[in-house]
Image: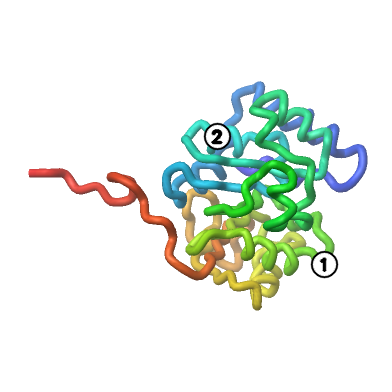
């Protein structure tokens, strides 16, 4: 499910937090992005959600055994996230402030297997912020790690702008889908899920995860 874009600056954050809390209380499935990230990740991966909102994806990933964390610049949404999930998993921080030094200073890991932005987070960034974030994310990704972005195709910060921002960051587009269920992407697709990968070899999966062959 895509619950729509988040709020702009100002008092809209409180209304957005209340809306998302209401959806969760009503049992609406808010974990589709978390299932996508989980599918790509090795077990017990370090994962960072930029613009985590009320923390539904972070909570879902932690329930699956990952070491997931979220940052968001809004106290309104973080208050809800900390009520619903472990408060230690969340920090008041903008996506643009994330770095290998700033994260440990807030008690979070300094390196991650995957970083993701879900729900049109890039639409609320300034024009020069997205390229900066690509470079900063590249610096905190483990070898073979990835940046995953889910956005409306035509919104500000959509896939065309993401590809421009990726240039020179060290991250390369490896997959693009029309939804979190791996639908094929086309220029007419209203939604996009893009995966940009860091150089190097991803940490190998343990046990049967990823490849499972039945014995004789």
Residue 133 rendering spot, x and y as whole percentages? 72, 62
Residue at image position (53%, 65%) is 197
Which element type, helix, strand or loop, lies under badge 2? helix
How many neighbours does mark 1 have within 10 angstroms: few (below 14), some (14-19), or many (20 or more)? Answer: some
Residue 46 rendering spot, x and y as whole percentages? 54, 47
- Pointer 1: what residue? 127
Is residue 105 toward the left or the right of residue 66 in the image? right
Q: Is residue 21 above or below residue 125?
A: above
Q: Quadrant of the N terminus?
A: top right
Is residue 56 toward the left or the right of residue 181 in the image? right
Which element type, helix, strand or loop, lies under badge 1? loop
Residue 185 rendering spot, x and y as whole percentages? 53, 63
Q: Quadrant of the C terminus?
A: top left
Where, by quadrant of the figure, is residue 83 drawn? Answer: top right
Asked if one can make out residue 129 in the rendered structure from this viewpoint, the answer is yes
Residue at image position (47%, 35%) is 64
Residue closest to the eye, 158 or 84? 84
Residue farthest left in this picture: 216
Task: In the rendered structure, find residue 110 and report the number of the disc placed on it.
Answer: none
Asked if one can make out residue 4 in the rendered structure from this viewpoint, the answer is no
Is residue 210 toward the left or the right of residue 107 in the image? left
Q: Earlier in the sequence, mark 1 or mark 2?
A: 2
Where, by quadrant of the figure, is residue 27 drawn? Answer: top right
Residue farthest right in this picture: 10
Residue at image position (68%, 56%) is 152
- Pointer 2: what residue? 60
């Amino acid at each position: 499910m895509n619950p729509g874009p988040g709020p702009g600056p100002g008092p809209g954050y409180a209304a957005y937090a209340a809306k998302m809390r209401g959806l969760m209380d009503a049992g609406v499935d808010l974990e589709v992005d978390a299932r996508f990230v989980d599918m790509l990740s090795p077990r017990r991966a370090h994962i960072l959600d930029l613009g985590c909102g009320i923390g539904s994806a972070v909570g879902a990933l932690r329930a699956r055994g990952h070491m997931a964390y979220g940052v968001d610049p809004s106290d309104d949404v973080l208050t809800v996230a900390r009520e619903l999930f472990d408060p230690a998993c969340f920090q008041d921080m903008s996506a643009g402030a994330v770095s290998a030094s700033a994260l440990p200073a807030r008690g979070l890991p300094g390196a991650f297997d995957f970083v993701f932005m879900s729900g049109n987070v890039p639409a609320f960034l300034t024009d020069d912020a997205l390229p900066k974030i690509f470079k900063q994310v590249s610096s905190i990704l483990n070898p073979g790690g990835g940046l995953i972005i889910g956005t409306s195709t035509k919104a500000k910060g959509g896939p065309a702008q993401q590809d421009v921002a990726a240039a020179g960051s060290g991250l390369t587009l490896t997959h693009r889908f029309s939804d979190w269920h791996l639908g094929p992407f086309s220029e007419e697709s209203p939604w996009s899920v893009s995966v940009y990968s860091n150089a190097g070899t991803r940490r190998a999966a343990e046990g049967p995860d990823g490849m499972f062959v039945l014995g004789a």
